[in-house]
Amino acid sequence: MKMNKLLTLLATVTLAFSITACGSNSAAPSNTEPAPAPSNTVTDTPAPEEAVVEEGLQAEDGATLIVWESREERAFTDEIAKRFTEKFNIPVKVEEVPAVDQVTKLTQDGPSGLAADVVMFPHDNLGRAAEAGLLLTNEALAEDTIANNTPASIQGVTFNGELYGYPRAAETYALFYNKELLPEAPKSFDDVIEFSKTFTDKSKNRFGIMWESGNLYFNYPFIASGGGYVYGDNGTNKDDVGVNSEGALAGLQTYVRLKAALPIKTGDISPDIKRSLFNSGDVAMDITGPWELAGYKEALGDKLGIAPIPTIDGKVAISFSGIKAFYVNSFTQYPNAAQLFAQFATNEEAQLLLNELVGSIPTNNAALASDQILSDPYVAGFAQQVINSQPMPTIPEMGNVWSPVNAAFPEIWDNDKDPKEAMDKAAQQIKDLNGSATK
């Protein structure tokens, strides 16, 4: 599917989703996975005797599938594979491979025919896999995929104008807060600053809010909420660097003002320090991701609240997100059956099952609007923020962004450097790195 057709479909769905959302009353750090011992599960149903037709695709006679899945989410894929076999009479073997290792393993095993038919990995690995020709595009089921999932998730599984993935979960960060200190979550960062005037006391190591203030990943709302960006054209144009754009500089004014709420150096903030202070009640609010949820629930119990990131200058805060998705191996012997599985394993029912078993945040619009998600006080906060997120760019040049911008933020925060001067320097460094990478 080429760019113009994809954008037309995406624009239509974005409008429809926006209308639905407005009418409703409902509400990168990379997690490495340990390499597991080999472990396989095979469904017991024999291979089909007749072809199966679904979603306009006819499964190949005698099709059998192998699916790679991470250890942490294995329970979901074992169950969804069982349901798929019951419906389509196609046996599925599930093999454990850490998500962050799957593209590398596919590069090695795909051409030799030893890789899985369906793989799963975070979207920031998509560019590498697509450029290497390891994945089939999602064309036959593209319209359904785009219609049923959030625009951000579709953007995340698209590369060079081609839709590749079948999104199944989104990950972003949100505002954790201590209800004993704040009965209600602040709506804006202005509210955060007002609260912190009476709570923050540097001499007592007590702060109204804390986050990794030198890290672009967590600071992206101050870049994007006013219209700034990393790369233009939805993160695909390496020649259009927007970290020093007018919109970015507007949002950074709020970033600067927040130093009054968190008057310490960026280097004095680490996940361990932040975690300890939040658990003890010495930090009232923490901007972080779902990886902290279990520990914070254990420490705070009913006092823990999760809400979307506060607004910035009256604008919704836009966070970075990561999209996990299934992809079809371009070397598979059973491309139709593999596509059917990828679609089946990411529909509304499947994503709600994934949330139930693993705690993942859906990308499916109907799943996000379901009672199961909206009635969970922890998941609902993340789900709302996911809707207001942008996936990290998938182009290889994203690797040239982190160091320059992560050097600029401490200059602004720690040394009171003018945001424009700091971001102009970072933008030029990114452009220089991009230029050298193409020589």
Image (cartoon, grey):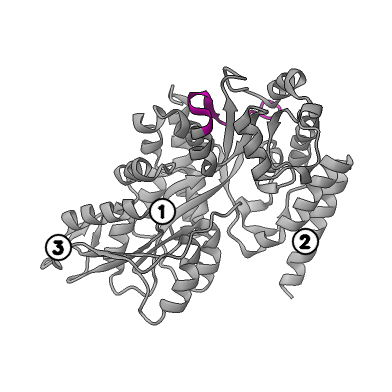
Secondary structure category for the residue under label 3: loop
Q: Earlier in the sequence, mark 3 or mark 2?
A: 3
Picture coordinates of residue 337 (x, y %)? Answer: 26, 64
The residues tagged by marks 1 and 2 sit, at their Cα atoms, a distance apart of 38 Å
User: Foreground: 356 or 132?
Assistant: 356
Q: Which contiguous range is marked in magenta?
A: 299-316
- On the image, numbered disc 1 is attached to which residue? 72
User: Foreground: 244 or 258?
Assistant: 258
The amino acid type of the residue labelled 2 equals Lys
- Residue 309 visible, this orientation: no
The amino acid type of the residue labelled 3 equals Thr
The residues tagged by marks 3 and 2 sit, at their Cα atoms, a distance apart of 55 Å
- Report the disc number at residue 45: 3
- On the image, numbered disc 2 is attached to which residue? 431
| Number of callouts | 3
The amino acid type of the residue labelled 1 equals Glu
Picture coordinates of residue 381 (x, y %)? Answer: 50, 31
